[in-house]
Image: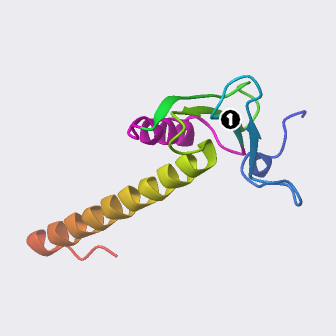
Amino acid sequence: MNQPDRYSRFVLPEGTPKVVYKPDTKLENAGTFGIMQEDHTLGNLIRMQLHSDKHNVFAGYRVPHPLETRLVIKLQTTGAKNPMTSMTHALEDLRSELNTLQTQLDQAFLEARTDTGNTWS
């Protein structure tokens, strides 16, 4: 069969960078981030986090082809921050929000387990 191995959609080949940044030559304070082995799930999370920053003028993403596991994020800032700094802050904020969500979910499961007397493992 001509189907590629399933792990190749998730495992990055050795020596390949996960993220590549290319400054935009036509727009000031803009750039493109290429993220390998990712899809719409991460793209939409990052895009929405970038939209929450008032210093970002534009943030959008696309997956160039459905068979490629590559994500392209375009970002333009007001100039108060450069795109690299803005992306770094967005990812740190997103990580913090996801950690908070995980803590709340763990607590809710623990409370549900205690209330019902179930001993889930």
User: In the image, is 16 to the left or to the right of 38?
Assistant: right
Q: Which residue is drawn at 85% across and 54% down?
A: 16
Main SS, magenta region, reads helix
Task: Please rate how many residues cluster around mark 1, counting C-alpha atoms within 10 Å: few if below 14, some from 14 to 19, many from 20.
Answer: many
Q: Residue at x 80, y 48 (%)?
A: 8
The residue closer to the viewer here, 106 or 94, is 94
The residue closer to the viewer here, 86 or 70, is 86
Confirm whether the magenta stretch covers residue 37. yes
Q: Residue at x 16, y 66 (%)?
A: 112
The residue closer to the viewer here, 94 or 66, is 94
Q: How is the image coloured?
A: rainbow
User: In the image, is 63 to the left or to the right of 43?
Assistant: right
Q: Which amino acid does label 1 sit on?
A: Gly
Vertical comparison of 118 with 86: above or below: below
Q: Where is residue 7 in the image (x, y as percent from the top left)?
A: 76, 52
Q: Residue at x 57, y 34 (%)?
A: 40
Vertical comparison of 88 with 110: above or below: above
Q: Name the residue under label 1.
A: 31
Q: Where is residue 53 in the image (x, y as percent from the top left)?
A: 41, 41
Confirm whether the magenta stretch covers residue 110. no
Vertical comparison of 2 with 100: above or below: above
Vertical comparison of 11 with 38: above or below: below
Q: Position of residue 22 (x, y in %)?
A: 76, 39
Q: Position of residue 65 (x, y in %)?
A: 74, 24
User: In the image, is 96 to the left or to the right of 19?
Assistant: left
SS at mark 1 in the image: strand
Quadrant housing residue 15: bottom right
Q: Quadrant of the N terminus?
A: top right
Instruction: Find the magenta span and give its range.
Output: 35-54
Q: Quadrant of the C terminus?
A: bottom left
